Amino acid sequence: MKLWVCCVLFAFACQSAFADWVRQPFWYDDARRDKVAKGTVWPQPKNIQTTTQSLSLDPDSFSVVTSDDAANSAVCKDVIDPGIERYRGLLFWIPADERVSVSGDSVLDRLRVTISGTCTKYPSLDSDESYTLTVPASGEATLSAQTAWGALRGLETFSQLVYEVDGKHKLNVTTIDDEPRFPHRGVMLDTARHFIAVPYIIQNLDAMAYNKINVFHWHMVDDQSFPFQSTTYPDLSGKGAYTQDNVYSPEDVRSVVEYARMRGIRVIPEFDSPGHMQSWGQGHPDLLTSCSPTSIQQDIYHLGPANVARNSTYDFMQRLFQEIREVFADEYLHLGGDEVHFQCWMSNDEIQQFMQQQGFPNTTEGFAKLEGYYIHRLINILKEFPKRTRGIVWQEIFDNNIISGDFTIDLDTIIHVWQWNNSNFQGIQYWDELPQVTAAGYRAILSSCWYLNFIDYGRDWPKYYECDPHNFTGSPQQKELVIGGEAPLWAEWVDATNVVARLWPRASAVAERLWSPQNLRDATAASPRMEEHRCRMVRRGIRAQPQGPSYCKYEWNRAGEANNIPTASGAQGIMGYVQQLLLLFSCLVLTFGLC
Amino acid sequence: MKLWVCCVLFAFACQSAFADWVRQPFWYDDARRDKVAKGTVWPQPKNIQTTTQSLSLDPDSFSVVTSDDAANSAVCKDVIDPGIERYRGLLFWIPADERVSVSGDSVLDRLRVTISGTCTKYPSLDSDESYTLTVPASGEATLSAQTAWGALRGLETFSQLVYEVDGKHKLNVTTIDDEPRFPHRGVMLDTARHFIAVPYIIQNLDAMAYNKINVFHWHMVDDQSFPFQSTTYPDLSGKGAYTQDNVYSPEDVRSVVEYARMRGIRVIPEFDSPGHMQSWGQGHPDLLTSCSPTSIQQDIYHLGPANVARNSTYDFMQRLFQEIREVFADEYLHLGGDEVHFQCWMSNDEIQQFMQQQGFPNTTEGFAKLEGYYIHRLINILKEFPKRTRGIVWQEIFDNNIISGDFTIDLDTIIHVWQWNNSNFQGIQYWDELPQVTAAGYRAILSSCWYLNFIDYGRDWPKYYECDPHNFTGSPQQKELVIGGEAPLWAEWVDATNVVARLWPRASAVAERLWSPQNLRDATAASPRMEEHRCRMVRRGIRAQPQGPSYCKYEWNRAGEANNIPTASGAQGIMGYVQQLLLLFSCLVLTFGLC
């Protein structure tokens, strides 16, 4: 009797742990056959030869192994072993009770991973992400890469080759030779207009890995709030965060950086200055310039941009960025530099006096020089850090060079081009800016056409897809200096409620643009792969929004929140699994103990 | 030792069940004080006199009681008792360990609910939703209504008066006299372009209740799919659904209707005909008109609108709508009637022959007559149902009257005005349509300006807020005939991944327009209440998206999905609670059994 009760309870608990996956495709599959391209890869590899000859995978016996001479170093294994484990979880999604035996089929038994180069602990701008992948008609599949990062990209590709037919996991005989077109492929999240809790950042890192995006540009702080908990200056978040719960502790940041590292994703923090610093002033008002009442900003703010006339400002920045450099680990720091309005500086006596000392005229040119002076000095501070550190800056810093004629910013600084010119915003077009930036010898990344916070009715991803960073007039050397781009999601209208669905799969369009060959540019032709990719992300637990009337075989978690999330998807499921395990354990003990 | 292990496991499990609610408001509270109006009501009541005199509530002792002579009938109690229970769960949200004792404060001990009229099992267009609510400086608060539906509205208002100060639940001495401006206040969901699983419909019903919306217009089927599982005609969904998992069983529908009923929400299903029926034709091709190759539609569809020339079509509809009427329970059925293109009918010999028999000319007027004939006959079928049944139709049915000069559609049919005229769509403006509809004596509901599927960058709710259904030239009698409106969310770009965030709080703007007095029209003035309302919805588990840089004291579930959802929010949490209980039970048994 007690055994019976336990079994019922146990079955009941188990039932809730596994969604009802019974789905039978029907007529609309045919009607929309053009919309789904099963087992296709996103972003499209550089070279892919595929066939219609299919092999089956047996989830019970398929293995991913590393060569004896591969993944040889501890540094490689540190990344690739967990990577293989993770992709093992992503390879097989058909519920066990719906799987059909593959006996009698041509079966692929093994994927062998070989890493022939040297691995690094962290990915970097110079990381080699190339790989070759061969799925032969017989024998084992092989994945060869120079680095663990390349091997991760290849594992992602391999996992995307797998598709479902009649209860079987299949993939086709295929040969792939792949590498990214650009080394810097990013998504920017703004955690200052709204705080975005770590689990949502983690979900985005998962999605980024599924799209081979390798930079998470963390626009950490801004006028509205300062969520970064600095150990050096606790008042920054202590007084500048929305609330003391809306903060990222050093442990939070480290967990994000580590989660990203394991996926070959760099985390580049942005601590924007000398503008956009209102929240800094809550705890450290002396950092900012007091605006006189004549300043155009006085009705909004008493304080303006950083007070660049004081040595104490540079000392502060030196100590803060030193801490940031340690916590975030990447060689590059984004220093911001956008949208500094000169009126407040103009209204402040201390700044005026300093400009006279420096010989800067009291004109736009002079203030451009002043901002250049500040950033130049900041970059020099970074240079003296024990760990090599370089800067990325928004395009205004370069534009100030043009205005002031004063190109003192180091050439190894990356210029982030973001402006555009239309009815909403009066800036320079990127195809006019990039020639100037690259002619001056700077490297550039592009964001102008990829502002994903701007939304429109309907299917807008083709617009992002069709924008190309080489769409400007310039020499081959100039084109070479464009090292990639980023899709920014400014967070005025975005928080945890909608951030994932807003980003995906729209950012996927940018991901393919930055990874795949330039001649792949037809969004209509890409649509069936996009449809497959979106459903794949949904199946993997990413809340990617739909792209037109349709359905996925595995829709977003049907029984409410959090049921459908598959095994390898990261942090949000962990407590659920712990509970499941506890429940299983408890019930088993109960069953054998009481009965 | 074993006890120790159990306790750790137990504590660990419990920790995951309760979110970390520690939040300290800080400077931005001041900076954005104008953005949040604590304890304000949305939609704004007709008459509200409030004071700054505050009372505290003691969660442990506060009670909601019904008068001896109130809630007197079983029919009233059926709705109001669970309603009181539900609102008890919504009244107190401060976590127990953060609550501060209210001893010494002026404390409100009790809310007394009185229902003085007659209750009905289901809400209807004629339901009285008025109520008065008094929170006096001393003694008990009173809520008086004519019906259980009015009492539910009053409970919602009472729950919204409560705000949080320093660990206490407070509300101010207030008197409210409230009733809706319009009796028909709806949200339309389209479950044909994308299937929306029941838990997401349930979440929307919760949100509707929080906004005093009383109609869920369920645009159940369309060209793309037929998810309604009919017992009379199983092939409709059997062949017309996306998949056999993307269907609503009769039990699903009944559970939705019951969930809605308990919240005073009518569920009005739409089975659109004679156009938009492609999915019906998958299982029942004879229902539809075969288009000749000369038809403009032939490159897309072989089949066009319903074949209105065959008696079998009417027999089919009679049996199907009879089933629908039973399952959905509301007196009104939405019959559709929009966007019927006449080319296919024009190309079909059987239709042509029928029109000759009927004396309809082979012109636009004739086809308008033909569609009118069909709908007229359908409405007559509904009239003969055992339960009183009336129709709602899209405006084309009325427009056809104008074209054909043939006003045969019953005057108790409601005309649903949806068209507009701008660069995207060439239709008639609602302020030109409503005068004609109401001059002809029909009742009307408005949707033209509330198409929430259309999205724009930024804060668009003021646009919906400022649109008024009485914004047309007409007599007071004509204005009276406008009985409300609906915010439609067509689902081309919406599914479970984004439906809730897309709807809320944008639909809240429509909710206030349809409930509150006409002279309340300043969106800027409404913003602080909107901010409070959005955060209140988030706190209650509704994924309502943000409306500009800000934060809520209780942000969307911080630890990932599904942790933050409070007790009364419906279906999605049930299995979680069962698991928690099992876990608790198992651990306790383990603790006392093993140790």
Image: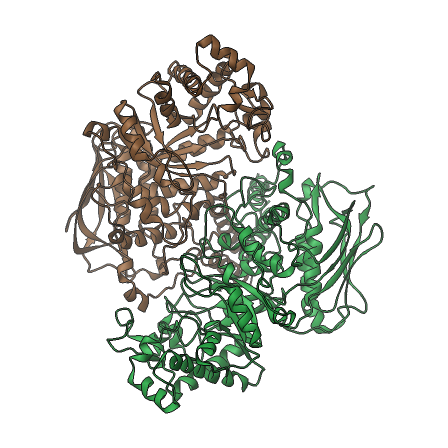
Chain colours: A brown, B green
Q: How many marks?
A: 0
Give me the residue at 23% from left, 28% from top: A478
- Is residue B468 toward the left or the right of residue B491 in the image? right
Residue located at (85% from left, 51% from top):
B138
- Residue B454 image position (x, y, % from top left): 45, 55
Look at the image and tell me whether residue A186 can be seen: no
B464 w.r.t. A194: above or below:
below
- Of A450 and A85, the residue lying toward us: A450
Quadrant in which the C terminus of chain B appears: top right
Q: Residue lying furthest top in this view?
A: A357
Residue B205 placement (x, y as % from top left): 56, 61
Q: Is residue A418 above or below residue A283?
A: below
- Residue at 39% in and 90% down: B358
Q: Is residue B38 above or below residue B509?
A: above
In screen coordinates, is A180 left or right of A258?
left
Location of the N terminus of chain B by quadrant is: top right
Q: Nearer the viewer, residue A571 or A40?
A: A40
In terms of image quadrants, where is residue A283?
top right
Image coords of residue B443 (percent x, y): 58, 73
| Residue found at the far right of this picture | B138
Viewer-nearest residue: A368 or B269: A368
The residue at 57%/85% (across/down) is: B386
Residue B400: horizontal and vertical position, in percent?
Answer: 45, 77
